[in-house]
Amino acid sequence: MSSRFTSSSIERYNDFSRLNPAIVGWHVHVKVLRRFHTDDYISKGGLGLLLVDDKGNQIEALICSPLTSHYSTFIEEDEFYTIMNFRVVENSGFTKLTRSDFKIMFYDGTIVKEASSFSQDDYIVATPFGAIFNGYHDTSYLITLIGRVVESSDLTNVTDEPSVIGGYRYSFTIEDQEKKTLKCCAYGGVAIECHDRFRNVIGTDVTCVLRWWKVYQLLDGWRHVRIYSHPPYSNILVQSDADNVEHS
């Protein structure tokens, strides 16, 4: 396998906004925002990455299972890399991690190098509750929300085996600055994470950031909107973790 892991020098890089499948030889400088295991028809048993460039553009990268063991040994969240020799494919599917038209696909000739950090505001852009209630949000895209927790349930497991992580459920309601509320439900490991994080800040207002969650419109009308965690992407930040959040 020709991939390498070395320090990068000063070079010119392509913005994600310029990527398209018609051209090869792209060279990008990225920060890894999220790393997760995938199980879809394209990259079953593979590794997924959410990448951001120095302009704030985001794109998803997929590493198929034969290559996972190699790249997973050194690609980490919150680290910076340069990547070259990769394929650019359509960002298709019922659920999309980014609003880019494309994804990046690694192959056995993809070269990854450790890189210096770049200057970019490291904030999270949150979707306003009103955009969801008014029907302006395309539900095929995962979103980020920020709100104060005003109600929560007990952590439950829908199976008879507490060891089955996927059986855990945790429901809660968040409120924005305009007192609009959204009902949320976390599944599996994210349910446990939400429960434990909220419990650790009992006695104070809990402000949380839901990153990469899914909007479901159960019936017509905003009262029937629900927000669900969506494996393997979703996670949560609580209180001080959320200091650098901005609303779009």
Image (tube, rainbow, N blue to C red):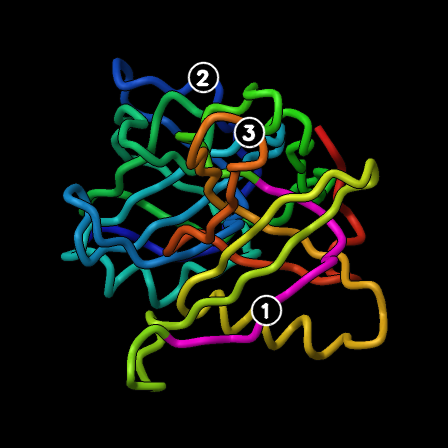
Q: Residue at x 31, y 58 (%)?
A: 37
* Res. 87 mark: none
Crowdedness near tag 3: few (<14), some (14–19) or many (≥20) residues, C-alpha within 10 Å: some
Contact check, label 2 and label 3, Cβ < 8 Å: no
Compared with 157, 21 (above or below) is: above
Q: Amino acid at mark 1?
A: Ser
Q: Quadrant of the C terminus?
A: top right
* Res. 153 mark: 1
Is 237 displayed left or right of 8 in the figure?
Answer: right
Mark 2 or mark 3: which comes first in sequence?
Answer: 2
Q: Amino acid at mark 3?
A: Asn
Compared with 163, 186 (above or below) is: above
Element type where label 1 sits in the image = loop
Crowdedness near tag 1: few (<14), some (14–19) or many (≥20) residues, C-alpha within 10 Å: few
Q: How far apart, in angstroms, are the residues tagged by discs 2 and 3?
A: 10 Å
Pointer 3: what residue? 57
Crowdedness near tag 2: few (<14), some (14–19) or many (≥20) residues, C-alpha within 10 Å: few
Q: Nearer the viewer, mark 1 or mark 3?
A: 1
Q: Position of residue 149 (x, y in %)?
A: 72, 58
What secondary structure characterizes most of the magenta part?
A: strand
Instruction: Specify the segment rendered in magenta.
Output: 144-157
Q: Residue at x 20, y 56 (%)?
A: 67
Q: Nearer the viewer, mark 1 or mark 2?
A: 1
Element type where label 3 sits in the image = loop
Pointer 2: what residue? 18
Mark 1 or mark 2: which comes first in sequence?
Answer: 2
